[in-house]
Image (spheres, rainbow, N blue to C red):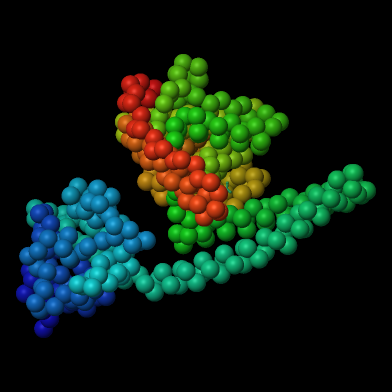
Amino acid sequence: MNIFKRAQAPTPSNGGSALAELALNTINDGVVIADANGIVRFINPAAGRMVEANALTNPVGVSYKDVLRLESKESRALSEQENPLVMAMNSGQPLDNFRASLIVGNLGKRVPISISVINANDASRSRIITFRNIAKELEEEGAQTEFISTASHEMRTPVASIEGYLSLALNPQTATIDSRAQTYLTAAHNASKHLGKLFQDLLDVTKADDGRVLPKFVPVEMVTTVRKMADEYNAQFNKDKKVNYTFGSSDGRLMLTDLKVAQVVYASVDLNFLQEIMDNLMENAIKYTPEGGSIWVSVRGDGDRVLINVTDTGIGISADDIQHIFQKFYRADNSDTREIGGTGLGLYLTKKRVEAMGGRIWVESGFGEGSTFYVSLPRLTQEEYDKRIFVLKNQQQFEAAQAARRAGMPQPVAQPQPIPNQQVNNGGTI
Ligand code: ADP
């Protein structure tokens, strides 16, 4: 007999109810069933153990929010608006394996969990919440990540050296080789470059996976920022103009010259993350678009989001591949892609970076039809942008004064900047 037995689960048909109860009482996953108002109606023993409930604190009849108190997986407080459990419970949308920290007991112990929510498909509109302790899983992932990270770091150095020597061998000013050696060394040079990129990508991915790199947000105007990044990437890596590049059309394929570029669209982003996102999307657009094709990049405001498009007229992606391309190591395998080098890590990392900034990435494409990658990020109003710039400037002045004081230098008189007058928001959308 367990303390939760008296809690009533919505029962399946009579024949199955005893077995269902047996299963719920024995599994290691926590199961909490709440009614449509979020009041806990059932909690199985595993859930009871995890939330450290006992006969005195039996959570049946209380709000699920008091039982399942969540923080982000990095143990950062979550407001209701950014708590996926609350959002799923309020909206009736399912939640699939969200990783979080569960706050347990009076002393506030943190337990890493993976949590899901589904809705009972009946008139009760009950919500079934399942969760499990993932401490061991995280430990194993951590050990694996550590190994990959150390191995890639160690191997990157000799590979860079091989690549360097092969470059010297292939350079007519530093070496003399016959044409057969040239062919072999060129192949070796390409392979070493691929290996170098693989190690670098692996290192970046392991850092992103273990949450070592947290975003440092700064307020920016997105049209100029993204344009600069895309223009510079294009100038550096599309030098021979294999692919035509244009910035500023919302849907390049349809209306290349008709649409005006947005005047001002603000967002709070990590500039290194944004650079990586743009580099990866530009690299792919150029790489997977045959000579003579075109790419377009644009930025616009879309309600409370900023939308970046990278469109190309390249080889496109089949419906089967689209659902996998954001997974680690996934590369579409067809006669077109086989010839093109890649590690299958770029889009995985790009997605991680976008999500770390509260955004979303998706693609529209068809095989042979070109592709459009969309990145949507939370947008700032002009007022929010001005406030954040004000805070940032004061913070920078304060830090400069601190640094000067530590270095024993005469200190600049830091005058706090007044909050700028509200400018007329000219819309910022196109
Ligand atoms: P890769 O290093 O292979 O380019 P990514 O993770 O960046 O790895 O991309 C995963 C796969 O998605 C690619 O191998 C390719 O099949 C497909 N892909 C990505 N971008 C494009 C694009 N712009 N056009 C066509 N296929 C693309």
Is residue 382 shown left or right of residue 87? right
Image point 23% across, 73% down: which residue? 107
**Where in the figure is residue 31, as x and y percent of width and height?**
20, 68
* Above-or-below relation of 203 to 288: below
**Where in the figure is residue 316, as x and y percent of width and height?**
53, 37
**Where in the figure is residue 319, as x and y percent of width and height?**
45, 42
Residue that extends furthest to the front in the rendered view of this protein = 410
Is residue 180 shown left or right of residue 125? right
User: For this rendering, which residue is in front, 337 or 192?
Assistant: 192
**Where in the figure is residue 380, as x and y percent of width and height?**
35, 35
User: For this rendering, which residue is in front, 157 or 198?
Assistant: 157
Image point 10% across, 78% down: which residue? 55
**Quarter of the rendering occupied by the C terminus:** top left
Residue that extends furthest to the top in the rendered view of this protein = 258
User: For this rendering, which residue is in front, 335 or 342?
Assistant: 342
- Give the quarter the ligand 1 occupies: top right
* Above-or-below relation of 169 to 4: above
* Above-or-below relation of 117 to 226: below
Is residue 105 shown left or right of residue 175? left
* Quarter occupied by residue 337: top right
User: For this rendering, which residue is in front, 259 or 377?
Assistant: 377
Image point 31% across, 64% down: which residue? 101
Q: Is residue 314 visible?
A: no
Image point 81% across, 55% down: which residue? 165
Q: Is residue 104 visible?
A: yes
**Quarter of the rendering occupied by the N terminus:** bottom left
Is residue 98 shown left or right of residue 414? left
